[in-house]
Image: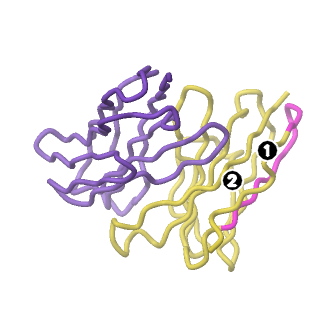
């Protein structure tokens, strides 16, 4: 079945450091890929998305490129802020067998220190 | 435009009891998904409803059930609660995904269930 693997956290950085959170996936067909963010005590919010190979999703300084050859969708940000501290989830949807179920990784906690 | 709303926000129940959680999707969305987010386990898919029908369910026992109403709102019912059912239950809505995979899911704030 479809699956998403994320690097385990927590990832701890100082403010203004560079961020990479790795995400790889296994899927039949051609999935769409997403990054969601969950701030403490809240639900998930869509951060960015990419729907086909080589697409780059971007939002709020975060970027991720859909790499079909490496089945990856790594999240990056050039300079993190304390307010970026949250849990980040990589996800995919695919029409495999008509299931359409959004599949999530386990989440990666990011902690940014001043 | 109102987002996905869930009620209640917090709930404490005793083992063996039954609970009902509610979700109102974004206007125009016909699909509703339920997920369980237990500590350290990420999001586990529970149920998917669209147009009033159950389309798929995750690997959970039958005491987890639900339904979707004609206005597309949804309920999740859990019978015979167990301690390990303690979790954040998240509801998400989207347009029917068969319309195209650009139909991302929008999440509610969740219901925090504690079973004691």
Hey, which quadrant is residue B89 in on the image? top right
Q: Position of residue B12 (x, y in %)?
A: 86, 37
Classify 10 Å Cα crowding around label 2: few (below 14), some (14-19), many (20 and above).
some
Q: Tell me the magenta residue range.
A: B12-24
A51 over B35 or under it: above or below: below
Instruction: Please name the residue shown 22% across and 56% down the image.
Output: A29
Residue at the image point whose x is 53% and y is 60% from the top: B106
Q: Nearer the viewer, residue A39 or A96?
A: A39
Q: Is residue B14 above or below residue B1?
A: above
* A112 sits left or right of B35 in the view: left
Question: Where's residue B107, x and y in %?
Answer: 57, 56
Colour that chain B carries in the picture: yellow
Q: How has the structure been colored for display?
A: by chain
Quick check: is B20 in the magenta stretch?
yes
Q: Residue at x 68, y 48 (%)?
A: B110
Q: Please check whether the numbered discs 2 and 1 fall on a single chain.
A: yes
Which residue in the rendered view is the most extreme toward the left?
A: A69
Dot 1 falls on which chain?
B
Q: Could you tell me which secondary element the residue under label 2 belongs to?
A: strand
Name the residue carrying label 1. Answer: B79
- Quick check: A94 left or right of B49? left
The colour of chain A is purple
| Residue B98 occupies quadrant | bottom left
What's the chain of the residue with tag 2? Answer: B
- Vertical placement of B7 versus B38: above or below? below
Q: Are marks 2 and 1 in contact (CB under 8 Å)?
A: yes
Residue A86 rendering spot, x and y as whole percentages:
52, 35
- Disc 2: which residue: B65
In front of the other: B84 or B25: B25
Q: Nearer the viewer, residue B40 or B67?
A: B40
């Amino acid at each position: 079945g479809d699956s998403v693997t994320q690097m385990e956290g927590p990832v701890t950085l100082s403010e203004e450091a560079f961020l990479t959170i790795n995400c790889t996936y296994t899927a039949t067909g051609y999935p769409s890929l997403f990054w969601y963010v969950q701030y403490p005590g809240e639900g998930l919010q869509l951060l960015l998305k990419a729907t086909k190979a080589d697409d780059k999703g971007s939002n709020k300084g975060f970027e991720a490129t859909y790499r079909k050859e490496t089945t990856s969708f790594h999240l990056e940000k050039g300079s993190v802020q304390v307010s970026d501290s949250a849990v980040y989830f990589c996800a995919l949807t695919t029409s495999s067998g008509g299931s359409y179920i959004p599949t999530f990784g386990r989440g990666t906690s990011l902690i940014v220190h001043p | 435009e109102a987002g996905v709303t869930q009620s209640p926000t917090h709930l404490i129940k005793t083992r063996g009891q039954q609970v009902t959680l509610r979700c109102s999707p974004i206007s125009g969305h016909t699909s509703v998904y339920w997920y369980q987010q237990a500590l350290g386990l990420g999001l586990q898919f529970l149920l998917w409803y669209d147009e009033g029908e159950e389309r798929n369910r995750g690997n959970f026992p039958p005491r987890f059930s639900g339904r979707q109403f004609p206005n597309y709102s949804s309920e999740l019912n859990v019978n015979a609660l167990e301690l390990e059912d303690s979790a954040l239950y998240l509801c998400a809505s989207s347009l029917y995904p068969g319309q195209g995979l650009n139909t991302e899911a929008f999440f509610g704030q969740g219901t925090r269930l504690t079973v004691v």
